[in-house]
Amino acid sequence: MSPYAYIPFGVWYLLIFVIGLVGNITVIHVTLKNRSLQSVQNIFIMNLAASDIVVCLLSLPITPVTNVFKNWYFGSLLCRLIPWIQGISIFICTFSLGAIAVDRAFVGCFAQNTGQLSYSTRDKEKQRLLNRTRRTTAILACMVIIFGLTWLPHNIVSLLIEYDEAEGHIFYIFGKEELNITYLINLFTHGFAMTNNVSNPLLYAWLNPTFRELLVKTFFKKRAKLAKQR
């Protein structure tokens, strides 16, 4: 309950909530508005964005409050509903990343064959296709890796907490009950896992020049038109 603990966490969660929500909504909006972005891999990315939005709306506001105050204030209905929705959201995210990995494996084999053909025939469209495929694969591979790295500590801590009673309260400093840091560690790892909601849209916008170009056209051209009409 120390303000030195919950104020930094509150600011951290607020930043992740705002950036994650705005970023993922932007990804979905720009993709739906531009048919050139509606490819197979971008549909996977839209699934990830939708999953991240659900996590932002349900996990970010509720989990830290529960961990800080160590009580449930959101009623019996939400107590049953939210874990179910959170589980589905994480399943969609994991399933989409698994589908991305399988898709990239097949595309990688195709790109390798195309690259060999391109090298032998010096065909430049095919070389562009190979470069675009490699860039897309790099984006999606980074998403998979970041998801694994950000969620791994929280999953490990959750398992340790689940079996903590049998192991003798491993999160008690020096074995003293008044020095129980279980909630603090859980909050820290959960906050780290939530950074995945921010990394996907930032990574996608940063490494995808086509998306950056269409993002500018989608938002700034609308503003220019409205300014001219006024």
Image: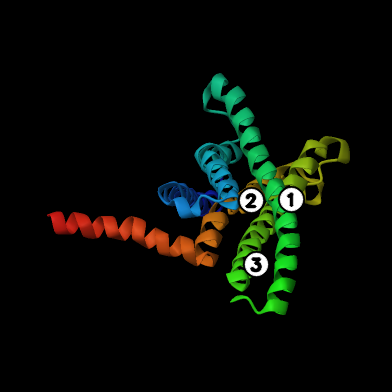
The foreground one among 119 and 201 is 119
Tell me whether the residue at label 1 lies in contact with that at label 3, contact meaning CB atoms closer than 8 angstroms: no
Query: Can you see residue 91?
Result: yes
Q: Name the residue under label 1.
A: 102
Question: In whole angstroms, how far apart are the C-alphas of marks 1 and 3?
Answer: 15 Å
Q: In which quarter of the image is the C terminus?
A: bottom left
The foreground one among 220 and 9 is 220
Q: Label 1 sits on what residue type?
A: Val
Q: Please identify, in this view, whether the residue under mark 1 or under mark 2 is nearer the observer.
A: 1
Residue found at x 57% / y 20%: 76
Q: Label 3 sits on what residue type?
A: Arg
Residue found at the very far right of the displayed protein? 167
Q: Residue 134 carries which label?
A: 3
Secondary element at tag 1: helix
Question: In whole angstroms, how far apart are the C-alphas of marks 3 and 2?
Answer: 27 Å
Residue found at the very far left of the displayed protein? 230
Query: Can you see residue 185?
Result: no
Tell me whether the residue at label 3 lies in contact with that at label 2, contact meaning CB atoms closer than 8 angstroms: no
Question: In whole angstroms, how far apart are the C-alphas of marks 1 and 2?
Answer: 24 Å
Secondary element at tag 2: helix
Q: Where is residue 147 shown, x and y percent of the image?
A: 67, 53
Residue found at x 53% / y 38%: 54
Q: Mark 2 points at which residue?
A: 193
